[in-house]
Amino acid sequence: MTHRKPKLVPILALCAISMHDAAGQLLNGQFVNAKLKNNQRRIYTVLVLPAQFNVPKFGAAGSEGRWREADLLEDFFRVLLRKELATHGARVLPYAAPEDQSDEACYALADLQRKYDMVEAMMLQVPKDVTRGRFTLGEAMDAYAPAAPADTVVFIRGRTQTYGGWALYGHLGFVDARSGEILALIEFAGSRVSDAVIDAALINEHVNMYSFLGPDPFKRPGAK
Amino acid sequence: MQVPIPRAALALLLVSALIPCASGAQPEDAGAFQFTKEDLKVLEECGVIERQFERRALVYHEEALEEHLQAAAHSLPPISNTGNAQWRVGVLRDPAVSAFGLPNGTIYVTTGLLGVLENDDQLAGVLGHEIVHVMNHDGYEAMREYRKKMTKREVIMAAAAGSVAVAGLGGLVISEALMASINASPEEPLVVAAISGYDTDVERRADQGAVAMMIHAHRDPAQISKALERMREKFESEAIPTFYSTSDNIDERLAYLRQVAGQGAAPSAPAQDRDLQGMPPAVGGAAYFKVIQEAVRQDVRMNINSRRFRNAVFQANWLVTAHPDDAADLCLLAEAYRFLGPRSQKATPDERSASVRHKEEKQSQKLTGEEEDKFLASTVEGRAALESNRARTEELYKRAADKDRGGAKPHLGLGLLYEQQGHAEEARSEYRMYLELAPEAPDKLRVQRRLKSLDQPAGGK
């Protein structure tokens, strides 16, 4: 019986590709628009849009989307973020569940989320350009009526990996509801978090997040 | 010496070979396909995917359109429940030209595809193609193949100890951008395979089955080729390949479809193939347009949102040609021209070349919309196009305001146009008019903010 030597080159190439794939998702930083950092622009009234998570399952028979888990995580994370923002002094606008909205309102939200995805793909290539206010959703924001009373709209994108536990990472996009300009791109990541400790891990990430937004990002002028 | 086969005999041969695929509602022997546990899991997954489409508001709901699509699908002869398929046709809100059938019998067509087709026969052709895929269990087969490929790949990955997870899709990898465009997970190979297309032979079988269905339904099979020709007419560079938008696929399909459908429609067809004689002309163009127009309006907005401005102008022009006095459609066309900005309405032959398209795609991935506009406007051609498109925009908004005297929308459009042009005074006047005519508009606050910024000394652009 002959034993073949494993071909190292293709294996290493696959490793490199996979490492690059993972690294490409992690920004290792928080990117805040100079206007926000210099207090030219403050965040008072926030609308948190429904989160969008990819929760793939990788197994011997390939990959598949775990939609139910994604739904749970999306709902959980959005509620958590709303609570966190409110705790830190932001006024968080209520958001009607999709089933209580008209088809037109649902379509408008889908269009806005899609627009954000397009801009986010570009942002992730050069995230530091967020600091100089390069990215904007433009007039797409105008078309979304529920955002009109808000000054800031928050988009949530996340993803999990399930090799030996849960690793979760993603981004929060803070967008100026008036101009569509991206105010901040905040990364969150929880490595090896299990279902049970996911809550605590994410809250920790949020605490760190606010330090990047500058001192008292949600404090109104004159407020104690 | 070769004996030439008479065309009619060849047509008979072809059609008789194709008809069993369609007429018996069983293009393949249903008994030959054994459902495994994994297949049943795939079936279950289809329901979950559909719920996700709904949850993310990707499905377009309009009763009249849904009924029309359902009727078009059921006009094809063999549409009965095969295996686990429960037939249903849905519309996805997406400007990409695409259609796909899930193994559970749900067929999705995109608003982008509806806007490209001209009549019910073309629609039936597309639906027929997808129905044959479902009836042939192509989705299940693709998933079985995928699982095999992935198992091999996992062995290699396991050898590469310490490597992190890979979002591998085996042989079914396609652009992640496409998945983003439908907001579907790139980890969902079932959807990926259905959108990007199956193997060439499988696709050819689906085309042939669709032709046979069309003939049986007294529809004009040549309309399938016509639909493909329209899909080939691209106004934009397509960064996202789908089975219905890939030129190579279309060229190849056109070649054999012309042969099959062309010969099928030959006047000397034998009497027993009565379906081939007196083929009715493509009917339903006007009825088709009427039923899809609202979906096309949606598509114009999505095209603008996705920076596919030429498509938006093309579709909005279509609407205005049909309703020259409709203020809403005039506004939509004006908006499409406003966003078209420094681009020409039609790509020049140079711009249609593969290399230029590739360059355009790269550029649009690197530059933001505003940067791209600025870059194009710095060229002589861009400046000329910008001037001409702005003039057209202004004319259309004014026409819309004229047609609908109390309408506020044209004034908002004019305000935005004048603000872009740096005509602060005119912009202010139009914004005020808008607020006067629509005091309760949902974007009232935003327009007030625009007015305020124009009033500030440095506010005028």
Image (cartoon, grey):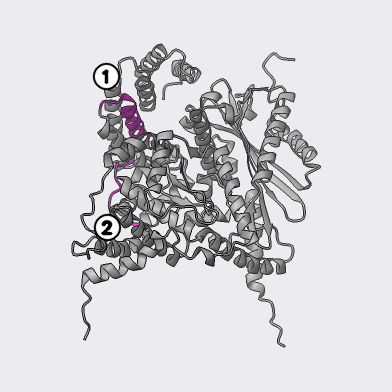
Q: Is residue B341 visible?
A: no
Of residues A181 and B211, the one nearer the viewer is B211
Find residue A120 and report its image quarter. Answer: top right
Residue B148: image x %, image y %? 61, 67
Viewed as shown, does residue A22 lie left or right of A140?
A: right
Sequence-first tag of 1 and 2: 2
Mark whose residue sits in front, 1 or 2? 2
Amino acid, disc 2 = Asp
Residue B436: image x %, image y %? 40, 11
- Disc 2: which chain? B
Tag 1 residue: B402
Give a yes or no on whether discs 1 and 2 share a subunit: yes
- Disc 1: which chain? B
Label 2: which secondary element: helix
Amino acid, disc 1 = Asp
Residues drawn in magenta: B325-354
Assess disc 2: are there few (<14), some (14-19) or many (≥20) residues with their C-alpha within 10 Å of its C-alpha: many
Look at the image and tell me in which quarter the C terminus of chain B lies.
top left
